[in-house]
Image (cartoon, rainbow, N blue to C red):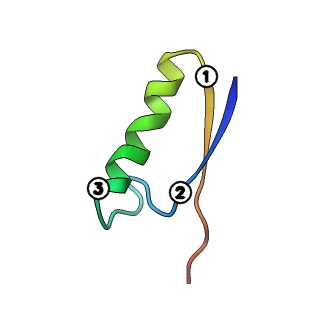
């Protein structure tokens, strides 16, 4: 299964709160289950 995760922050790239920790831990957990996760971060600036 291919999964696209869109988030505003992800550890270790961008971190302002707890969301970054969860967003950073999710792709490896999905990969361990056999999924093909991809992460998309918006370009702020």
Near mark 1 (Cα within 10 A), the count class, few <14, some 14-19 or many ≥20, is: some
Q: In terms of image quadrants, where is residue 24?
A: top left
Q: Tell me which residue sits at (53%, 57%) in the image.
A: 7
Q: Which of marks 3 and 1 is in front?
A: 3
Which mark is first along the chain, 1 or 3? 3
Q: Name the residue under label 1.
A: 35
Callout count: 3
Residue at left 61%, top 72%?
43
Whole-number angstrom distance, CA of label 1 to CA of label 2 = 18 Å
Secondary structure of the residue carrying tag 3 is helix
Residue 10 in percent (x, y) is at: 43, 54
> Which residue, given by chain and number where applicable, does mark 2 sit on?
7
Q: Position of residue 9 (x, y in %)?
A: 44, 61
Mark number displayed over residue 17: none
For the C terminus, which image quadrant?
bottom right
Sequence order check, earlier mark of 2 and 3: 2
Residue at the location (44% across, 26% down)? Answer: 29
Instruction: Identify the image quadrant of residue 40.
Output: bottom right
Q: Quick check: marks 3 and 1 in contact, CB under 8 Å? A: no
Q: How crowded is mark 3: few (under 14 residues within 10 Å), some or many (20 or more)?
A: few
- Along the polypeptide, which appears first: circle 1 or circle 2? 2
Measure how far apart labels 3 and 1 are at the Cα level: 24 Å
Question: Which residue in the protein does label 3 denote?
Answer: 18
Question: In whole angstroms, how far apart are the C-alphas of marks 2 and 3?
Answer: 12 Å
Screen quadrant of the N terminus: top right
Verify CB contact (< 8 Å) between mark 2 and mark 3.
no
Query: Which residue of the protein is positioned furthest toward the right in this rendering?
Result: 2
Residue found at the far bottom of this picture = 45
Where in the figure is residue 36, as x and y percent of width and height? Answer: 64, 27
Q: Nearer the viewer, residue 39 or 6?
A: 6
């Amino acid at each position: 299964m291919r999964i696209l995760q869109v988030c505003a922050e992800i550890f270790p790239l961008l971190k302002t709160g707890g969301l970054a920790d969860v967003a950073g831990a999710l792709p490896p957990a999905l990969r361990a289950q056999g999924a093909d996760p991809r992460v998309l971060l918006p370009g702020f600036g």
